[in-house]
Image (cartoon, coloured by chain):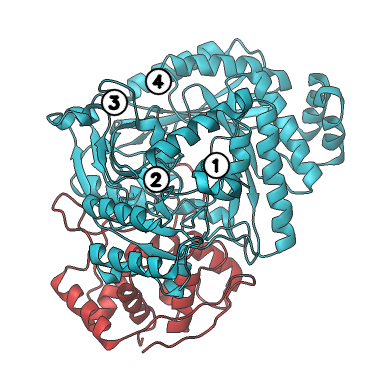
Amino acid sequence: MTIRRFVSLVPGTHRYGMRGSGALRIAAAVLASLVGTATALADPASSPGSAWWPLSAEPDEALTNPLERRGREVFDQRCRACHGALPDEIFGPLFVSPMPGTRALRDRYRGELPAELERRTDLSAAYIEAVVRDGYLSMPFFRPTELSDDDLEALIAYLTRDR
Amino acid sequence: MAIPPGVSAADFEAAISAFADVVGAEWVFTDEDTVDTYRDAYTPFRGEEEEKYASAAVAPTNVEQVQEIVRIANRYKIPLYVISTGRNLAYGGSAPVYSGSVVLDLKRMNRILEVNEDMAYALVEPGVSYFDLYRYIRERGMRLWIDCPDPGWGSLIGNALDRGAGRTPLPYRDHFGAHCGMEVVLPNGDLVRTGMGANPNAGPNWQAFPYGAGPLADGLFAQSNFGIVTKMGFWLLPEPEASMTGRIRARRHDDIVPLVRILSHLQYQGIVNCLFSLNSPVFQAPMDERKSALLDRPGGGSAAEWDAYAASLGVPFWQTELRFYGPTSVMDAQWAYVKERLRAIDSIELIDGNDVIRFPLTDDQIRRLGDPATFGVPSLNVFSGQAGTTGHLDASPMLPHSGEAVLRAHKVFLREYRDAGIPLMLGFAMSYHTRAFIMFHGVNLTTDPEWNRRARALYARLIEVAGEHGWGVYRAHTAFQDHLMRTYSFNDHALMRLNETLKDALDPNGILSAGRYGIWPKHLRGNRA
């Protein structure tokens, strides 16, 4: 089943369509996260998890839903370097400020909404998917070879979970 | 489904089906939504007809699959466009130069094949990002540094092949310069290894001695379309003990001449090996009427006129910061000698940083780093400067190490920005390479097509002006690579004739990355912009 929608986030970017969201693929993502094989890296010499973040991440033990747990990993791997919490203070010289996404959203919402995505409770699946696959201003879009449809489903589950 | 120009629907369908047999159907993308993620996220043609699109994408996971894909492309004359991680933002991203090409996405080839701590090198595939290699090294407690560009999500191989640079000591920050050995799939599907890699028994010698014997082929595969690099070795810096800085200010316009002479010689001697930027609080300050008038004076204004202007602003004409890496005793001696040499400039001000940072950094320090790339730590922090834009273009001329050239370049480029009515972005010389400065210039892009039209015109003009002064731009957005290569025109474009001769010999069907760096296959040379 494919649900097609048209969301224009930035004037001038063209139409965006949402990919299919089958229960099978969600089940596959759950299974992958349970058996810990949710990585494309096959060679033993390779890093156990590709991530756009310099440090190993800690799992969130409070998350019991496997899909949401995988979503939290995806957030750590693909989102946190821009959308994480602002550090209390800077270590060493300051060239450009950490957390560009959080800073941009802080300037945009001016306190009306949380600047950190993980603290938002108003995000919809459609909006998250649109931003990830179509980009938003200086945030580029991401290909399935960087962030698979399964991982996107998990990310959506994490960011839209009941709290 | 979009079809590459000049290819029949039947042939394209057959090729797509053959690609799927090689990589699995789930790694061949033909649906419009997914193919749309192979655009240029920072296109200067947002929403305009000239924007480039792929027809499909195929994502192999090993060298044998790449060879098969190339053979299929030859059979059906399918134009391929190769990307590593597709993160070359500001230089074309993941979009092809030739619209309708099938993107060969190497992101899944993400194996770190070897990190040798004793010999301080890494051997990686094209899908390996700077983050990947950093994490691999840190997780194993290896005392090695990588050198990364400011955004760390890009490919080591992709960045080196576009001759990108980072911010740790030389030679490591010159990414092509610090590579050693390649494996390349040629356009006919053959597989070659360069340097010592051509010796089947080379082992670690592949990453030790770059030359091997005979012609050095590596240069052919950077900023070109002569092959697909599937492995590349990189020399790594053993982790320094510590780092500290010293700051330098010079008051006068002409001080840049001895400043550059002394600093460059210190660099050639290895006493200064950090990345430093020659900032000018005068030239980089916002444009005003007095500055504009000075730029229109003969020669762009005399030293005395500029010094008077700088005095009215109350700022030094030049300032820079040197960073040292190593044991504190060595760094102290280096900085002491730099100070001794620079005291020859009578207006010089030399300020101790008193800011020793010791390595390895703790996790907590890494989380709070304001300038990670200085310490070889990848981040995405550089995007902090870009909120509200839809990307940027980057025009970076190369200047020789000459204070006179730096002065002239500042005035020439400031005039271009002023005449375009676009505020200066960046506009300072940096010591990325051993013997030349990159003089960084940027132009922001927006959602406004009229602004983007002006930004493109300025960008094209910067490339031309740089060429006219012999400061050729070193790298350009794919939409401007024809334009760039025309400035490298000695002997009626003999270099491009050589490139085309090589292209025709290596890739007679013209299947590989048509148009990259102005190199078009024979049947598409009419496409040249």
Q: Amino acid at mark 3?
A: Pro
The kind of residue on which mark 1 rests is: Gly
**Structural distance between the alpha carbons of marks 3 and 1:** 27 Å
Q: Which residue is mark 2?
A: B158
**What chain does badge 3 belong to?**
B
Q: Which image quarter: residue B179?
A: top left
Q: Is residue B114 left or right of residue B500?
A: left
| Co-location on one chain, circles 2 and 4 | yes
Question: Disc 4 to disc 3, how far (Cα)?
Answer: 34 Å
Residue B210's tag is 3
Locate residue B485, reporting x and y percent.
58, 36
Element under label 3?
loop
**Which residue is located at x 51 percent, y 68 percent?**
A135
Pointer 4: what residue?
B332
Q: CA distance from mark 2 to mark 1?
A: 18 Å
Which chain letter matches label 1? Answer: B
